[in-house]
Image (cartoon, helix red, strand yellow):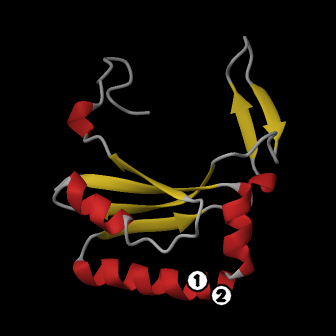
Amino acid sequence: MPKYMLIMRGTDESNAAMMANIDEMMATSRQFIEEMVKAGVLLAAEGLDDPGRGVVVDFSGEAPVVTDGPYGETKELFGGYFLLDVASRQEAVEWAKRVPAVRGSKIEVRRVAEADEVPQGSESNGQI
């Protein structure tokens, strides 16, 4: 079965709304995760730390430039993900529609490429 990643995206405003009701959000999220486990589709789920604690490595110039967070404008923050093993994109979308989320946030649904879909270089032997 194909794997799909549900990428949680929020804004400063939607993240603030989520934090205002964090206990309720955590309880609802735990219940949602239990439903995915019972359905046998959940492979992994992780949330990310505050973006102010991260860094960005920018490869726009000749040498990589590292910038500490928070980063300028944060219109859409990658806040975490669910990795699902489902039969189709439509099934992944149906799970995404059930994610406990606050107004203003988004869930991006992307299929995870299979190993045979990644170009195999002779030197790297497919290893990153």
Residues 93 and 37: in front is: 93
The residue under the point 82% across, 39% down is 72
User: Label 2: which residue?
Assistant: 23
Rendering coords of residue 36 (x, y %): 32, 77
Q: Position of residue 57 (x, y in %)?
A: 71, 32
- Report which residue position mark 1 lands on: 26
Q: Is residue 85 visible?
A: no
Q: Is 33 on the left or on the right of 29, as rendered?
A: left
| Rendered residue at 67%/22% (across/down) | 59
In the rendered view, would you say 8 is above or below 120? below
In the rendered image, residue 74, in percent from the top left (x then y), is placed at: 73, 46
Q: Secondary structure at mark 2?
A: helix
**CB under 8 Å between discs 1 and 2:** yes
Please provide percent x and percent y for residue 37.
32, 80
Q: Which of the pair 45/26 is nearer the observer?
A: 26
Q: Give the amino acid type for the residue marked by disc 1 in the picture.
A: Met
Q: CA distance from mark 1 to mark 2?
A: 5 Å
Graded by Cα atoms within 10 Å as few (under 14), some (14 to 19) or many (20 or more), the crowding at tag 2 reads few
